Every structure is written in C-alpha cells, then in structure tokens.
Image: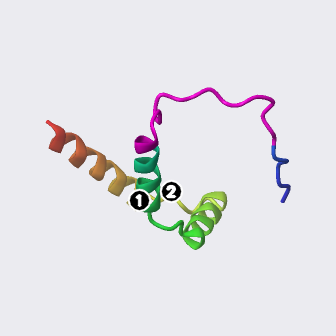
C-alpha cells in the first residue's frame, strides 16, 4: 500500500469561521476528545465485505430502508 506524501502548505490557511476564539477552539477540542475510538477491526472487516460483494444483502438493505422511514416519520 502506498502512503501519500505529506504536503506542506506554502502559506498559512485562512482563518475559518468555525473557530475564531480560544474558547471556541477549546470547545472543539473537548468535543473531539469525547468521540468514540475508531474501531479499525470493524472498518477493515466491512471494507473487505464490500470489496467481496458480500456487504449489501437484501436484509441489510431492508433494515436501512426501515430505519430511514422511521427517521422520516419521527421528524414529521
């Protein structure tokens, strides 16, 4: 597997509207710290299933459609 080279920006990135103060930055850092750990084993398994054509089964598609319909009906 090839790892892309890291690109160094030639000039600083412009300030974004999402984090203008140190308080906002601290809030973002706090929220990122609360994110769950990445389950690499699950990601790798799902990617392998997708590549092998075994991920999208009729049962999974039905479950996804039912979940989307439930979400839509709850928002009404």
Q: Is residue 72 above or below residue 12?
A: below
Q: Is residue 29 above or below residue 36?
A: above
Picture coordinates of residue 43 (x, y %)? Answer: 58, 64
Q: Which picture quadrant has residue 60?
A: bottom left
- Going 16% across and 44% down the picture, which residue do you hit? 74
Q: Which quadrant is the N terminus positioned in?
A: bottom right
Q: Is residue 67 above or below residue 40?
A: above
Q: What is the crowding at mark 1: few (fewer than 14 residues within 10 Å), some, or many (at least 20)? A: few
Picture coordinates of residue 58 (x, y %)? Answer: 42, 57
- Going 36% across and 52% down the picture, which residue do you hit? 64
Look at mark 1 in the image and give the residue it sits on: 60
Magenta region, main secondary structure: loop
In terms of secondary structure, where does tag 2 sit? Answer: loop
Residue 30 disc label:
none
In terms of secondary structure, where does tag 1 sit? Answer: helix
Q: Nearer the viewer, residue 5 or 69?
A: 5
Picture coordinates of residue 63 (x, y %)? Answer: 33, 57
- Going 39% across and 61% down the picture, which residue do you hit? 59
Residue farthest to the front, as pictured: 22
Q: How many marks?
A: 2
Q: Which quadrant is the C terminus positioned in?
A: top left
User: Which contiguous range is marked in magenta?
Assistant: 7-24
Was residue 49 drawn as part of the magenta stretch in this picture? no
Q: Nearer the viewer, residue 38 or 56?
A: 38
Q: Nearer the viewer, residue 58 or 71?
A: 71
Look at mark 2 in the image and give the residue it sits on: 56
Marks 1 and 2: CB-CB under 8 Å? Answer: yes
Was residue 8 drawn as part of the magenta stretch in this picture? yes
Residue at mark 1 to residue at mark 2: CA–CA distance = 6 Å
Picture coordinates of residue 16 (x, y %)? Answer: 53, 29
Q: Nearer the viewer, residue 58 or 8?
A: 8
């Amino acid at each position: 597997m090839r790892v892309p080279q890291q690109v160094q920006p030639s000039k600083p990135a412009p300030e974004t509207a999402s984090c203008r103060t140190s308080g906002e930055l601290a809030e973002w850092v706090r929220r990122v710290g609360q994110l769950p750990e990445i389950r690499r084993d699950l990601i790798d398994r799902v990617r392998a299933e997708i590549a092998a054509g075994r991920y999208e089964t009729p049962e999974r598609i039905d479950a996804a459609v039912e979940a989307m319909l439930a979400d839509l009906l709850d928002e009404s």
